[in-house]
Amino acid sequence: MRRHHRLIALSLAALAGAACLGAPTPLELELPAQFPPMHVPEDNPTTVEGVALGRQLYYDKRLSPDASRACADCHLQAQSFSSTGGVGVLPHVNLAWSESFLWNGATEGTLEDAMHMEVNEFFGTDVALLREPDLEELFRAAFGDPEPSTDRAALALAQWQRTLTSGNSRDDQYVNGDLSALSESEIRGRDLFYSERGECFHCHATRLFTDNQFHNNGLDAEVAGTGRAAVSGRSLDDGSYKTPTLRNIAQTAPYMHDDRFSTLEEVIAFYSHGMVYSPSVDALMQNVHEGGPHYSEQEQADLVAYMGALSDEEFLSAPALAAPVAAE
Ligand code: HEC
Ligand code: HEC
């Protein structure tokens, strides 16, 4: 039901897009059950028209200076807005709760700050390419002024990002009382995930499945100066990376910041018996000197199964999150 409200609001926005004359319409974002409150900056309230502009820009190649690529070329909805279009492409899901962005957290602050970085530094957007009637109309509807700017583009992209919330996986249905939503293997995997033998939940924490912190989870023995340490300069951050969310994790292969694992089976085998010691390795990486806690074959299969229960099919296929089409 919740998601349906969003769909209706967004498609009305698209309908209104061409003709709307009044002030932008506030968009009340309904959050999945048990999610923490979402912080929305006062100077960039979420509006129907702002989200419509952000969505258009996300899918629009004119955002790049030679009109060669769009955000969505690397961030594909069906893959939880990740892809294999680059190394370690991070998904766009529930980023409204993040305060540091990129694997090493080089960009800190709000989603607005992150989108400023993406537009101005990563893409180097040329505003001249945005001065076209269709986009000017969307800028006018969102900001009351048809003049495009990279600042407004970033604000609209941040609003759009706040609509990329995923919280309707089978695991959510289970948590919300539908005990038949998970198989027996998935329930065993879940129990292990939340146990002191598994330890997963400490870092892949809350309903966001990330603590939005940085950890060295034991991938490499030589870690000096890598990961978060490249930003902070602190040796205790050597080899530490932003904890990735596990939402829609079955859709985001390959895995880890350098894409070293192709499958979830490989990831779980790593946590079972493939971890290696380094001085900054997180204290939660149990038995790291022996590679890990050595899960049984059944335990590993159960953990893989549980990962698959974190996919939110509605999010991965919601029309409101897909590329806008003129006739919508
Ligand atoms: C060529 C592929 C590519 C394109 C195009 C692209 N990205 Fe990304 N994106 C990546 C990769 C790779 C990462 C991870 C980089 C890192 O952390 O070092 C990433 C990470 C991000 C993150 C950080 C997510 C997090 O969890 O911290 C955000 C936000 C983001 N991209 C937004 C955008 C936006 C907005 C656009 C369009 C302006 C865009 N990206 C275009 C490849 C791309
Ligand atoms: C100490 C914190 C911590 C613990 C405990 C932990 N993880 Fe992770 N996990 C991370 C970090 C950090 C990464 C990213 C590391 C990198 O790419 O360098 C990660 C990566 C992953 C990935 C790949 C995500 C992606 O998008 O590439 C999966 C899957 C995963 N963990 C599952 C688990 C499971 C299952 C457990 C329990 C057996 C677990 N994690 C325990 C911190 C942790």
Image (cartoon, rainbow, N blue to C red):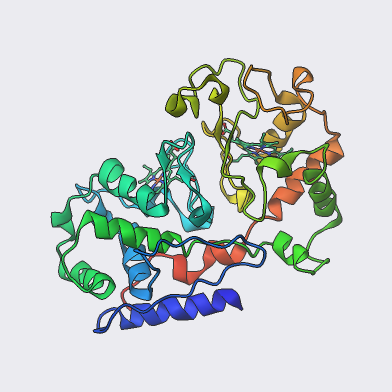
Quick check: 277 left or right of 300?
left
Q: Can residue 275 be seen from the camera position used here?
A: yes
Quick check: 144 left or right of 11?
left
Q: Quadrant of ligand 2?
A: top right
Residue lying furthest front = 42
- The residue nearer to you, when weighing 48 against 231, is 231
Quick check: 282 left or right of 298?
left
Residue in view at x 52 percent, y 16 percent: 224
- Quadrant for residue 256, please give it: top right
Q: Is residue 328 above or below residue 95?
A: below
Residue in view at x 76 percent, y 49 percent: 305
- Quadrant for residue 56, please give it: bottom left
Residue in view at x 57 percent, y 39 percent: 213
Q: Can residue 83 be seen from the camera position used here?
A: no
Residue 90 x/y as whole percent: 49, 44
Q: Is residue 247 above or below residue 4?
A: above
Residue 202 x/y as whole percent: 71, 42
- Quadrant for residue 1, please give it: bottom right
Residue 306 x/y as whole percent: 75, 50
